[in-house]
Image: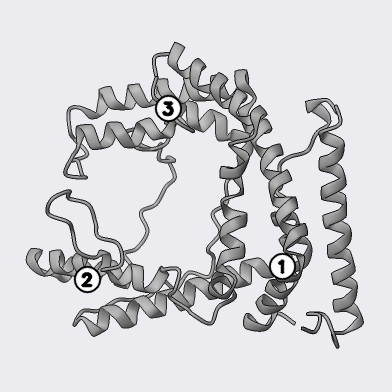
Amino acid sequence: MARADAGRSTVARGAALARTAVLTVVVVGLAACSGGASPEDEVVDLSPFTTLMNAELGESQETISQLREHRSQERLAQCVRAAGFEYHPDASDSTVVDVDLDDYEERLRTQGWGYFTQPEVPEDYEIPEPTEQMKYEQSLSPSAHEEYLRVLFGETDPATGQRVEGTGCFDHAYGEDADDDSPEVRFAELLEEVRTAWEVAEEEPEVREARDLYRECLSRAGFPGVRIDAAELLDERFVEEFPDGSFASNDPRLAELASWELELADAHLDCLTESDVQTVAARATARVEAQILERRADEVEAYLAAMREYYELD
């Protein structure tokens, strides 16, 4: 099979060389980290795969995200219309949520994850004008709206009350096989291995040790039973308190549950610091990702070439 960069411009071949350099730096850097460098000297904020994507695709990733979203919205609209309803695609150009990581800890301590807590609303917040989609949903009768939600989100298993995956238009529009020609589908196996690198890393001895310290810390704080992350307890508590999957904003249980959620958030953040599990796990995940990129280098190159062609980036 011919190399993916054969016949490409000098600029493109230069990018390929830069890609190799980035990967080399990542691998060498990880090797240095495992050789006794202090945690303060280690940089683990970006995965090798993310580093590679940033170096190769840069700002084009925002364009790709927008194209994906627009295509998914159009598929969703077609599916809903085929069921006899209307759907007005989101006309927003941005799919990136701006998150200030510097105040993440403060927000988590004061607002939790947002399961039972009420988010703070700025004093100058203005309620946006209803979208065409909102207006349409509000025009439906209660019975029609119930059917509309079934079309959107799929059937519900009467035995469990849980949504049956693959039965709604959202699944059709956003499912893994929604666009069979896309690079994301064609290289799904590669991307899945990268996506689940953290699961492989969780079996590394140093990660298991740090994770045990994290769990023990949470147990001492009154939150036992965590497997990976404290947020698991939120799901369990939600199902326990609201088995039908919903609650009213004035439910009298919310005050107590919100207080419990904030206590959990405090314990979670304190235990992350005590165990250093995030840094240890990120370092191990980065090593696994680097091994994947090295072992499947030809596929990675082909994936990047397919991304450029499919999304017309060249």
Residue at 84% x, 57% y: name it: 22
Q: Are marks 1 and 2 in contact (CB under 8 Å)?
A: no
Residue behind mark 3: 226
User: Which numbered tag is attached to residue 151?
Assistant: 2
Q: Position of residue 115 (x, y in %)?
A: 34, 37
Dot 1 or dot 3: first in sequence order is: 3
User: Which numbered tag is attached to residue 150?
Assistant: none
* Mark 2: secondary structure: helix
Q: Are marks 1 and 3 in contact (CB under 8 Å)?
A: no
Q: Position of residue 69 (x, y in %)?
A: 48, 71
58 displayed left or right of 38: left
Does residue 288 lie above or below 39 as drawn? below
Q: Amino acid at mark 1?
A: Val
Q: CA distance from mark 2 to mark 3?
A: 35 Å
Q: Observer-nearest residue: 162 or 118? A: 162
Q: How is the image coloured?
A: one colour
Residue behind mark 1: 300
Q: Amino acid at mark 2?
A: Val
Q: Amino acid at mark 3?
A: Val
290 displayed left or right of 160: right
Q: Residue furthest bottom?
A: 7
Kindly report which numbered mark, 2 or 3, lies closer to the viewer in this rendering. Answer: 3
Q: Residues within 10 Å of mark 1 (few under 14, many from 20)?
A: many
Q: Are marks 2 and 3 in contact (CB under 8 Å)?
A: no
* Mark 3: secondary structure: loop
